[in-house]
Amino acid sequence: MKQPPIARVLRPLARAHRGLVAALLGVGALASLCEGMGISLFLPLLHSMDPAGFEEGTGGALGRVFHRVFEGVPEGARMQVVLGAMFALLAAKAGLNAASGLLFARLDARLVNELRQRVMDQALRVRLGFIERQRTGDMVALVQNQTWETSGALATLIGIVIRLATITVFGLALLSISWRMTLTVAAALLVISWIVRQIGRRVDRLSEDGLREWNTLSQRCIEVLRGQRTARAFGREDHERAAFAASSTSTSQAYWRVERIRALVNPTSELMVAALLAGVLLLSVSDPGKLPAVLTFMFILFRLQPQVQRLDTDRVNLAASAPAVRTVTGFLHEADKPYLPEGTRPFRGLEDSISLHDVSYRYDGQADKDSALRGVTARIPANRTTAIVGPSGSGKSTLTYLLMRFADPLEGTIHLDGIGLAEFELATWRAGIALVSQDAHVFHATVADNIRYGRPDASDAAVREAARKAHAHEFIESLPAGYDTPLGEEGIQLSGGQRQRIALARALIRDARILVLDEATNALDAIAENVIQDALAELAGHYTMIVIAHRLATIEQADHVLVLDRGILVQQGERGRLLAEEGLFSQLHELQPGRTP
Ligand SMILES: Nc1ncnc2c1ncn2[C@@H]1O[C@H](COP(=O)(O)OP(=O)(O)OP(=O)(O)O)[C@@H](O)[C@H]1O
């Protein structure tokens, strides 16, 4: 598919910061004008050394203009006046350049910050399944590098526009000295520019490879660091080292291929322009009367050369950032992303039941026949404890995934007291339901803040109360700084059971009347689990509890049981009745060690 030009992709970003961009362009254009006029004064300066040339007004239209401007100045003072004007213009240009540097820095700081935040906002808004499919390495590279490269690309693009203005000013000065010589030079410069553009195209293609390699490297890095224990336990350090080395080497090689070509741009264009200058000089030395005009022409051309050269490098740099710019803008593009439609009805509590009617769900990439849930019709009564059981992979967590409304069923419906779940506001629904999931994620924050994550305005007393209910208070008190102990990668590492208790306290503090516990106590010892079961038993009758547990002892207090098998609801009903029935539930029960009758 043909990609849109990078300048068009960047246009919306420029529009969003139009004030700063306009200021930059204005300052840039003024600086070009000052510089162009400043160096054009070289002509009257040379003429002031040769009054005859001045009187004749050699140097084409420009010579005539300067003749008119400076003819009133006494001959003896002309040189000083011209030098003074030259200095004033070049000083103004230096001041404008400084302002432009500040404006560029301001734009960059703002834009990178904004892009990073927009990327994260998109990651938090888009449907969970979409974001969970992205590789962590790609996401880290997107947030950290590619946003920054995108901002750099916009600065480069603005730089190109300013440079074009400078080249135009210089070009006009050259034209007004000699249009013939200018057109010859312009034709030659166009050829040079075309050659460099071909190089730019190649750099764009190679940069795509570089970006891909870079993302793979970030992913490898994350995997090696996260999988340390497994790698060491299985003696696979050499394998990890080799895989990382291979990825690192191919990243370096990909960038080497880009840089090698990029390094050629400047010298190539410099060499070609030098040849051009030499050609102009050779052609014009024949007429000494025109020397001031030719020298001024050469001088302007000499100043023009780095601008043209920078224009070429800028273009190649822009091409090199193109893949990053497309990745960032592509990720932020909303039309092709999945979002959950928002309902408008506030959720105020469950009175009767949650009911599922013919619910099916398949994750992206799952085959039809492997659907995680197939035609599930079930009822979860309010203020009761419902257990969801079934073999591993039977769809239990997927059911809670849909109940939390991380996604909507592909077929069928979920109703709360007879009203479609999708009709409710997401925020009030999620405020009414609390989940303790299998991963028991702990944030890099203090213990208290990890618990308070469930209810940010909770008091210290409420945090402690929730921790007590989750049987976590005692171990928290024994941590180096108690509730203020930092957790996570840079803090204390907790055991699986301790993490579960923090996650449970976080859910309990939320004070939501629907509690979903997905294997929430499987890492606890029997004593801790019993204490928590007792705490949860106290909530029974006031809370709707949905409990997933492999250990059937955990769900002894359940009023109602849903039994899943390969995505299909095979049994549902009262626990006692299902135990007495022939079926998967009684079979699972038979297989449990230390089962209770
Ligand atoms: N994010 C996902 N993307 C793709 N497939 C998934 C995803 N999560 C689960 N699955 C698949 O969907 C099916 C049901 O998974 P689910 O996690 O709901 O089972 P489960 O009964 O909770 O299993 P367990 O008891 O092992 O936790 C499985 O085949 C699983 O491989």
Image (tube, rainbow, N blue to C red):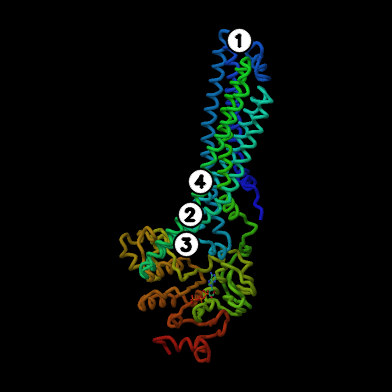
Q: CA separation, marks 4 and 3?
A: 55 Å
Q: What number is the disc on residue 51? A: 1
The circle on residue 260 is 4
CB under 8 Å between callouts 4 and 2? no
Which quadrant would residue 282 be assigned to in this image? top right
Q: What is the spatial separation of the Cα atoms under label 4 and label 2, in whole angstroms?
A: 14 Å
Residue ID for mark 3: 455
Answer with mark 2 or mark 3, whichever residue precedes in sequence.
2
Characterize the local packing of mark 3: few (<14), some (14-19) or many (20 or more) Cα atoms within 10 angstroms. some
Give the quadrant of residue 332. Answer: bottom right
Separation of marks 2 and 3 at Cα, in angstroms: 44 Å
- Inspect this view and state whether residue 241 appears: yes
> 249 left or right of 280?
left
Image height of 145 relative to 527, above or below: above
Separation (CA) of disc 1 from disc 4: 52 Å
The kind of residue on which mark 2 rests is Thr
Tell me the SS state at disc 2: helix
Q: Is residue 462 visible?
A: no
The nearer-to-camera label among 2 and 3 is 2
How far is mark 1 from mark 2, CA to CA? 64 Å
Q: Nearer the viewer, mark 4 or mark 2?
A: 4
Callout 4 environment at 10 Å: few (<14), some (14 to 19), or many (20+)? Answer: few
Dot 3: element:
loop
Give the amino acid type for the residue marked by disc 1 in the picture: Pro
Task: Identify the residue position indicated by label 2 in the image.
Answer: 251
Of mark 1 and mark 2, the one earlier in the sequence is 1
State the CA–CA distance, disc 1 to disc 3: 86 Å
Q: Amino acid at mark 4?
A: Arg
